[in-house]
């Protein structure tokens, strides 16, 4: 009993990130594929951002929001991949609790900000299609900056309680995190004591945020599509629907990868830790890879500038 009390009173302040633990020494084989994936993400997203920033004709709210979304993609990948590759190559995977919580905060905050940018895109298209004559009057630069600021503050506010509660937990079961990042549930598995409040708050905020996002997106695009079909000009109607189609593809990619990973994570609880690591890598990195491809291939103005560039 005394041994248990000693263990319970210890709270580890330093952890070891052990991503893909089943591979053991073979984890170095993951360096090449993840390095290539990271370079492709940087190249694709960076190329679209470069085109939007250098072409004055693309200095419009829709394209600015696209470049902001892709910049968030780069930040998300950079928060995860370099540290993972460094641990795979050098086996120096030690991380303090403070750094772990900072990484957790940035990863989840960037993911939330990513979804909020999609909401701003829906709002932008709603105003452009439903109120075309007042679009430039409503969506000014100041309004756009204000909306982006609100989206950033909301992203921080929705994630702060989760990280604050995690910082108050005692971790005595182990100091080895079987994950390549400081993922919330992977860290909570090492806790001792009651973490029901952490689980409840985390789940409630996630469900609330997802339902709110989907309701707002559904309401916006329902109105947008309804208004698009009422446009008399066939060319303008086709362009409006095509643009919305690109945004909807990105929305399905982002929310689909997140929801599918959550479902698989809960259904396949008996699966190996390597499978859970792979699922996390999937929902963190696949949208970063697919989003610039969608916008580069389907957005006519960006595609034309890509053709000129090459």
Image (cartoon, rainbow, N blue to C red):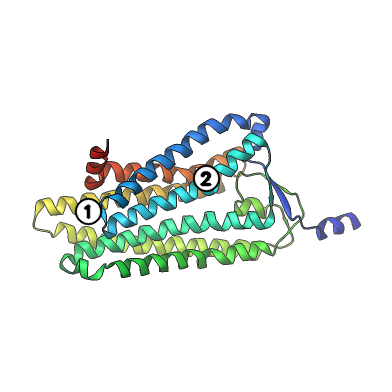
Coordinates of residue 215 in the picture (x, y in percent): 37, 63
Residue in the foreground of this view, choosing between 188 and 80: 80
What is the spatial separation of the Cα atoms under label 2 and label 1, in whole angstroms? 43 Å
- Packing grade of label 2 (10 A; few <14, some 14-19, many >=20) is some
- Find residue 1 and report its image quarter: bottom right
Residue in the foreground of this view, choosing between 60 and 178: 60
Name the element at disc 1.
Answer: helix
Residue 272 is at least partly visible in this image = no
Question: Which residue has dot 1 on it?
Answer: 57
Apparent side of residue 275 relative to residue 188 in the rendered image (left or right):
left
Apparent side of residue 234 relative to residue 108 in the rendered image (left or right):
left
Q: How many marks?
A: 2
Residue in the foreground of this view, choosing between 5 and 157: 157
Please name the residue shown 9% across and 55% down the image. Answer: 233
Question: Which residue has dot 2 on it?
Answer: 264
Q: Quadrant of the C terminus?
A: top left
Please name the residue shown 24% across and 70% down the image. Answer: 138
Please name the residue shown 59% across and 54% down the image. Answer: 103
Apparent side of residue 94 relative to residue 234 in the rendered image (left or right):
right
- Vertical placement of residue 148 versus 288, above or below: below
Apparent side of residue 101 relative to residue 294 in the rendered image (left or right):
right
Residue 37 is at least partly visible in this image = yes
Of the image marks 2 and 1, the number of the one nearer the N terminus: 1
Coordinates of residue 22 in the picture (x, y in percent): 65, 34
Q: Residue furthest right?
A: 2
């Amino acid at each position: 009993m005394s041994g248990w009390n000693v263990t319970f009173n210890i709270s580890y302040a330093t952890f070891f990130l052990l991503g893909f633990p089943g591979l053991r020494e073979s984890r170095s084989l993951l360096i090449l594929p993840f390095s290539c994936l990271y370079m492709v993400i940087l190249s694709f997203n960076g190329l679209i951002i470069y085109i939007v920033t250098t072409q004055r004709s693309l200095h419009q709210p829709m394209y600015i929001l696209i470049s902001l979304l892709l910049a968030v993609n780069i930040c998300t990948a950079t928060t995860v991949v370099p540290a993972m590759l460094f641990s795979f190559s050098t086996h120096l995977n030690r991380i303090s609790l403070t750094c772990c919580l900072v990484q957790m905060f940035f990863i989840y905050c960037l993911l939330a900000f990513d979804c909020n940018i999609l909401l701003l895109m829906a709002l932008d298209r709603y105003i452009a299609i439903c109120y075309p004559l007042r679009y430039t009057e409503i969506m000014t630069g100041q309004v756009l900056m204000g909306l982006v600021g609100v989206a950033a503050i909301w992203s921080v506010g929705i994630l702060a309680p989760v990280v604050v509660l995690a910082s108050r937990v005692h971790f005595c079961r182990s100091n080895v995190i079987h994950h390549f990042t400081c993922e919330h549930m992977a860290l909570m598995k090492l806790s001792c004591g009651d973490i029901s409040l952490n689980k409840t708050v985390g789940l409630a905020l996630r469900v609330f945020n997802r339902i709110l996002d989907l309701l707002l997106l559904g309401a916006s695009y329902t109105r947008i599509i309804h208004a698009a079909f009422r446009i008399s000009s066939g060319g303008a109607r086709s362009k409006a629907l095509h643009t919305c189609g690109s945004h909807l593809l990105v929305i399905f990619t982002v929310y689909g990868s997140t929801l599918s990973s959550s479902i698989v994570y809960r259904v396949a609880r008996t699966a190996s830790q390597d499978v859970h690591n792979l699922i996390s890598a999937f929902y963190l990195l696949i949208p970063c890879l697919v989003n610039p491809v969608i916008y580069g291939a389907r957005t006519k103005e960006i595609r034309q500038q890509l053709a000129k560039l090459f």
